[in-house]
Image: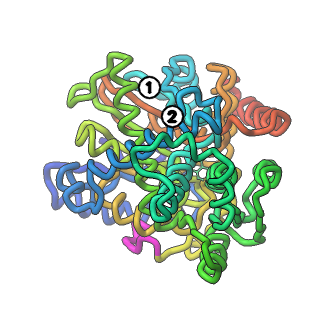
Amino acid sequence: MDYKKEEKEGKLKHKFTKDRGKWESFEVKKMADMLTDIKNFKPVFWQNPNKLSANKALARIDFSFDDILDAQKRLQRFAPLIKKLFPETEDGIIESPLVEIPRMKQEIEKLYGGKVNGRLFLKCDNYLKVAGSIKARGGIYEVLKHAETLLLENGLITLEDDYSKISEERFKKFFSNYKVAVGSTGNLGLSIGIMAAALGFKVDVHMSHDAKEWKKKILRDRGVNVIEYREDYSKAVEEGRKKAAAEKNTYFVDDENSRDLFLGYSVAALRLKEQLAELGIEVNKQNPLYVYLPCGVGGAPGGISFGLKTIFKDDVYCYFVEPTHSPCMLLGLITQKFSAIHVRDFGLDNITEADGLAVGSPSRLVAEIANILIDGIYTIEDEELFKLLALLQDSENIKVEPSAAASLKGPLLVNSSTNAIHISWATGGIFIPEEIYREMYKRGKSYLKDTALY
Ligand SMILES: Cc1ncc(COP(=O)(O)O)c(C=O)c1O
């Protein structure tokens, strides 16, 4: 293989070969090159050399299949309450559709001049009810778990009760004695704020400077206390954590360390398995699954990858995607320093329009898991996000936010068989106000015009 040519074409890949000695020397040399590219804001594709087989990795990870099932059962217990509080969910289960996007597949091939082997699907968390993003999976789950714990401790419910009664005024009064707090770039804050406020909790959301005004407005309209920072996400989390620790009855949802968030995300894998089966798709060695997940601090893509590897083992390949300006998980894994890095240590500014991914340091909890579990990470420039956002609108009439569009380039970067099933995870978008979305779309269209392909 002509690696130099591949590198030039932006398709740099790091492959295992049978000759391990040869592979290692190749990898070490390329790592140095890759760090240089990362520091120069160049997009890279990194194949994880520390990945273990699914069974070996799972044996070392401190979460189990039973933990995922436990989380799923908790969400089922709460379904009657969610149905009552958010009738738009219909059955009280907050889930998104899985749709095939063949026209977008053609657009990706045209834009990048390559071939996507197999079928391409979009997991539409951009349409997730209640909070409009992937963060709803973990965020809402953790708020519900905390609420359940408080109610059980105070003898106000039993596990066998119909939880719809939790919408009664007396429960709201009970929760008003407690506060839930969180640090966020926007979407986790929305999930926690919307659900905690609906239950009756007081809520503090500590927002980094990246957080969009319209997200803050949605929260303020629901009575949430939004605290703004001029600094980035790490600072918002740090300050939020400190303030919560100093207060009585305040529960801090810790995006950098939370096991509950992680498990809330992981339930998506059980649901995806069902959706694939409904489409008559069987995942196995001959029909492998490739999943592309936008990564900020790592909780959402980490929890979902854990769930998918638990179910599909080595027949699923999980790739994270990060902006070239905020590749915190990639740097954490390449350097093996996990959370003990910030992208600014590498001269990067952590400034990106993909606000959900504008994170400088990864979660240690997730980085240690991702290190042995995931298949790789690629990075993407902001300009590409807008192009992909506009192409998805034109080809499939689907609205996503820039963070979510990042997942659409993945299928073109991997070498897959023609039987592969690719899933780009569209992590958010439905709540974007129309005028702001139109501007994003126009921006994408103008970048596309510059390519002379459109
Ligand atoms: C739209 C969107 N996609 C992806 C992510 C990444 O999730 P995580 O920060 O858990 O890695 C976020 C995080 O806020 C997000 O808002």
Q: Position of residue 176 (x, y in %)?
A: 69, 62
Q: Earlier in the sequence, mark 1 or mark 2?
A: 2
Q: Position of residue 298 (x, y in %)?
A: 48, 57
Residues drawn in magenta: 332-339
Q: Residue visible at 47% across and 26% down?
A: 121
On whether ligand 1 comes within 8 Å of the CB at mark 2, the answer is no
Mark seen at residue 375: none
* Mark 2, residue position: 93
Q: CA distance from mark 1 to mark 2?
A: 36 Å
Report whether 177 appears left or right of 409. right
- Which residue type carries mark 2? Ile
- In front of the other: 371 or 33: 371
Q: Per the image, is 337 magenta?
A: yes
Mark seen at residue 115: 1
Give the SS element for disc 2: loop
Residue that sits furthest to the bottom in the current view? 246
Report whether 6 appears left or right of 134. left
